[in-house]
Image (spheres, rainbow, N blue to C red):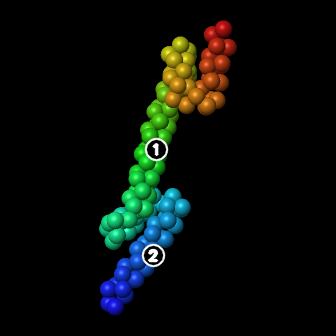
Amino acid sequence: MPDLTKQKALDDQYAGIIANADKLLMAKTYPDARAEYGKAGNLKPSESYPKTKIAEIDNILADIEAQKSKDDQYKGLIEKADKLLTEKSYEPAKTEYQNAIVIKPAEAYPKGKIVEIRQSTG
């Protein structure tokens, strides 16, 4: 009978960790959620759920990092283009705004600046 009690305690502990990890994931607290899924996976190595969730979190974190890199690159191009525009270096500024559009095609700001340049040089 002690094995059954031990298994129930293990199951309860695992369920508690998973519930906490799921809450953390819903709250987008990714590193903490990942750590909790890791604990659950260590507790029950044959369970696939923690491994699946860890892979999901790793993908989310990679996407966040890629977006941050894209945002930083876009911001740098816009700053450079704005500086060139202030200096009335229209063609180089236009090129930098076009480069920014390649990174973030939906952004209106660089498109508006290109129109402004065309009007200034027209």
Amino acid carrying label 2: it is: Gly
For the question of whether residue 43 can be seen, the reply is yes
Residue at 53% from the left image edge and 13% from the top image edge: 91
Residue beneath the point at 38% across and 68% down: 40
For disc 1, the marked residue is 63
Q: Is residue 121 above or below residue 77?
A: above
* Residue 114 pos. (x, y %): 61, 19
Residue 28 x %, y %: 51, 58
Name the kind of residue labelled 1 in the image: Asp
Tag 2 secondary structure: helix
Q: Residues within 10 Å of mark 2 (few under 14, many from 20)?
A: some
Q: Is residue 94 above or below residue 40?
A: above
- Across and down, in percent, residue 75 comes to 50, 34
Using residue 21 as the reference point, say whether residue 85 is left or right of it: right
The dot on residue 16 is 2
Quarter of the figure that contains the C terminus: top right
**Among the two numbered marks 2 and 1 on one chain, the one whose residue lies closer to the N terminus:** 2
Residue 84 relative to residue 1: left or right: right
* C-alpha gap between disc 2 and disc 1: 29 Å
Up/down of 56 relative to 113, above or below: below
Residue drawn at (32%, 90%) of the image: 2
Element under disc 1? helix
Quarter holding residue 101: top right
